[in-house]
Amino acid sequence: MNTHLKLIAGIIAVFCTAVVSMPALAVDLTATEITSANGRVEVKKTADPLFKKLHSNLKLAGTLKRLDGGDKVRTYEKSSAEMALKETCVLAVKEQSIFEVPQILGQEAIRQLTAQQGTILFKVVSGSNFQVQTADVIAGVKGTLFEVDIVDNFVSMLETPALQIGTVAAGATNINVYKGEVELTHKETGQKRSLKAGEGLAALSSPLMKLDKIFSDGFTPLRKFNPASMLTQNFGSGLTSLLNVDASLAGLTSLQGLGNFNNSLGANRLSGMFGGVSDKIQKLVGGFESGRGYIEGAKELSEAFGPGYKADFSKFSQETRGFMVTDSRYKEVYLGNKAFAACKAGAGSRSAKLEPNAEGLQLTEGNAMFRVCRFKNADTDIEFLASHYLNGNQLVTTVNVIKGELYGRIPGSLEHFRIPAGARSFVYGTDTGSGNWMQASEGSLEDSLNDYSFGVASKLAEEKSRHDQQSTQKKKAVGEKVLNKIKIKKFW
């Protein structure tokens, strides 16, 4: 190597060493903001009608990374975020989480973060009057390191910017305390629990409370664990250092960020919350886990005649990437969980953008129309029509329930409500942050929606017809065989 190349190599080596040894920036708790974003993270400002994607390079994120009370943060699959809540706490947010930033109305005011779904780790400043609220529980914190893991009690089949449309399910909120103390109040029963370091339990929704009388107060039995081991298992070894970080404001301010952590929610979260209870209850919870509130109870015919028809949905490929639809024709897609949607652009949009998520389908751009159905074998148990459009500062989602029982929820909120019968429009005001039901205007749902017939419905009907014919022939053959035996016995 000549002298010139050696000089360049030396400069590069010195530069790389300097970069590696550069200390990470300390956490800034003078403001509420997102301090790190990996993958797809979105923010909905209170004045904006839609969630907006946050640039992963926060230097290019502008004011979107700075958060105010009422703003909502959302992480998608294989994504995560880290944020600081002014003078209160540092958060590690896993994938598929949605929460609302608390309103801070003064130094002594209660800072209440509202979380809809997902998993969040909190490192809270000692003495903060801080609460976390989910659909199941309110957690009051006393200077602590703790985790909230929420299995949503609502399954969204279709989501527009104004409304999530879906069904209710069994849900729960699991709390693990790694350091400090958390006071819990169950939102339905009013019962209270106190958790200390190395203790955890789950607050249950109504369907799970009915599994056994031991859950009548709304909580699972107390679990005990090793804080360092559990923290490593759930978030990775990199975050165990938080156990040694002083919970004072100065202690958290000196924290050099949270770094990389395990952002995966993992599988069987609901079942895992029932660790230590009987096998019988574990199996029942497993049914809720696999079906998310939709458990098929088709009965089998006798062994001699073979099983009844059972549709095979494994042959359908679920959408995994975002796609565009036009106003010229419907695109039929499989949403998973035995549900399908036919969709196209509408109400003045030449095209619309749609994103599949863990549960269903999300409209992210433009106006669109939908026909959605969920199957139980060859028949449907849920079917509805929907459309969405923007009218000034109003987001209008029209729904007509054809079959089944549907519920709605504003994205990011905790409360769901029954969707009324008939063609009704949910009108959400972006200026007020609230919505209400109104009579649907003429033409909100195109005639083509009523006329649309799912191709998958025809295929399932044909398969069932063939199965029934084969079953009838088998029954006839078995019947003739039995009859012949009777005749022979009688003859002899």
Image (cartoon, rainbow, N blue to C red):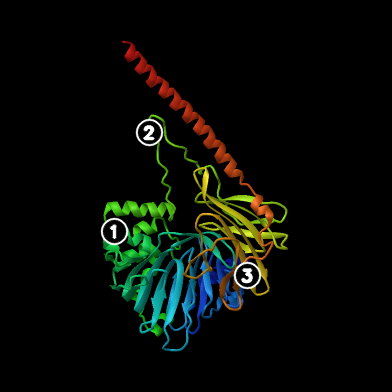
Q: Which residue matches tag 2? A: 302
Q: Is residue 23 visible?
A: no
Per the image, the residue denoted by label 3 is 395
* 82 or 13: nearer the viewer: 82
Q: Is residue 104 above or below residue 132?
A: below
Q: What is the spatial separation of the Cα atoms under label 2 and label 1, in whole angstroms?
A: 32 Å
- Residue 317 horizontal/vertical position (percent): 56, 46
Q: How far across and down, in percent of the image, does residue 26 sit?
A: 47, 79
Residue extending farthest bottom: 107
Residue located beneath label 1 in the image = 212
Please state if 95 lies on the left or on the right of 445 as rendered: left
Where the C terminus falls, by quadrant?
Answer: top left
Q: Quadrant of residue 422?
A: bottom right
Residue in the image at 55% along x and 39% along y: 461
* Mark 1 residue type: Asp
The image position of residue 329, as x and y in percent, is: 70, 51
Q: Quadrant of the N terminus?
A: bottom right
Distance from the alpha carbon under mark 3 to that under mark 2: 53 Å
Three-letter code, disc 2? Ser
